[in-house]
Amino acid sequence: MIKTKAKLEKQDILNLFTCGFKTDLNVAMEFERLPIWDKTFEAVDYNAGICEFLRQFAREENWDYITDDYNIIGLKQNHDTITLEPGSQVELSIKPEKTIFDLEKKISSLDKKMESILKKFGITLLKYGVSPLTTYKNINLIPKRRYKIMAKYLWGILSDVMMRETAGIQGCFDFKDEQDAIRKFKIANMLTPFMTAMFANSPIRGGAETGYKTFRGLAWLNTDNDRCGFAGFDDFSFEKYIDKVLKSPIIFLNKNNQMIEVDGKINFENYMEKGYEGFDATIEDFELHANLYFPEVRMRNFIEIRNHDCLNMPYAILAIYKGILYNESAMREIEALFKNCSFKDFAELRYNVPKSALQSRFKDAYAADYAKEILYIAEKSLIEMNTGEEKYLDDIKEYTMNGLCPADVIIRNWNGIWNKNLQKLIKHLTNN
């Protein structure tokens, strides 16, 4: 007798989250950067240099290719990867580690290896949130089949900017059980607009000042609201998160290595119930669909926080979240800080931050006032942990305690001593 495969059930999906329970809590990071030509500051195209960079790095360092339809779209070695975002942005994803020191050591080692090869090509990986000169119309998509489908499907007036021009930093954090996950998830969502403001670093785009301190943040606000934004505050659970993902439209399916374009005709809930064009839903389908759901904070078998511009102090981002999310008293202090704040308060702040960053109003004060308190709570917690990781807060403290973000300094210099000279901006970004 031939056994038919059981229909995908919500419990199968819940198991993806519950398998993430851990007693030892680690941290991880995804670190995107913008490849630009050293001489012209224009974005480097996949075919003009990035593909060959990947080939040469793989040969010299013995990494394996990641391919899509025979095109090289990244490299892997054990649990570490170097992959490409749609506009050839280079992303490092490093195996989770116990301390931020361990992550920094691994990334610094990789950076040194990459730098020697990048120099031969005349390429710099820029720690900045948006392409400083080349705009999306002149940035080709890499030859990854899903990106072509996504670019055609994603709605929102700045979705092309988000895909092709922007670079960010994502932090990943563990949880002990569902209750711990839900609590951390809610706190992370509360923190994200303040963290976006603190680390805003993309005011110059297309060689001109945009009027925004994080143009990357603005791009995400204007990309497909069916799958972006906040994913949970009050009455929340794994099941409620899954329900949100299930109700979002499907962009495509990957069946037998063939891309089946769905184009939002059905959501995943409908797909589980009725199938689509002869296909039945599988757990692999859900995993793909969930990876195409882009909230500020994404629940997986860990918590992924995705809202920060790329900049030259990535470990400060991890340190703040670690100090708060891995300390009971710190979490209580954050909950007390925001006990009288509503979802609407955070949503309004999220929409104001791209333009005003820490000068945005929040309740009866400014975002800067709350950011200082967040930083104080995180630092106190890290000192209690006695790991020395509070040192990663030194650079951001200089900004935050003065009510500033990195973009404020860029804008001041751009309109002052740099005299709108792009070369001086690039020098500032590469020397820090």
Image (tube, rainbow, N blue to C red):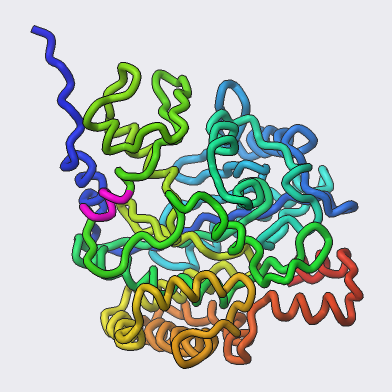
What span is in magenta?
Answer: 239-244
Q: Which percent across, then down, holds residue 163?
A: 61, 47
Taking depth in this image into account, of 33 and 148 the one nearest to the observer is 148
Give the total of numbered labels: 0
Taking depth in this image into account, of 260 and 410 the one nearest to the observer is 260
Quick one: quadrant of the C terminus? bottom right
- Residue that appears at 39% across and 74% down: 344
Taking depth in this image into account, of 133 and 426 the one nearest to the observer is 133
Q: Decide: is 173 above or below 139.
A: below
Q: Decide: is 214 above or below 416.
A: above
Residue 289: in magenta span: no
- Residue that appears at 75% across and 32% down: 47
By secondary structure, the bulk of the magenta-drawn segment is best described as helix
The answer to whether 206 appears left or right of 229 in the picture is right
Residue closest to the far top = 1
The answer to whether 192 appears left or right of 138 in the picture is left
* Residue 217 placement: quadrant: bottom right
Q: Which percent across, then down, holds residue 134?
A: 79, 50
Q: Which percent across, then down, holds residue 28?
A: 44, 59
- Residue that appears at 40% across and 36% down: 250
- Residue that appears at 26% across and 63% down: 181
Q: Is residue 92 visible?
A: yes
Q: Is residue 97 visible?
A: no
The answer to whether 414 appears left or right of 237 in the picture is right
Q: Decide: is 289 above or below 171.
A: above
Quick one: quadrant of the N terminus? top left
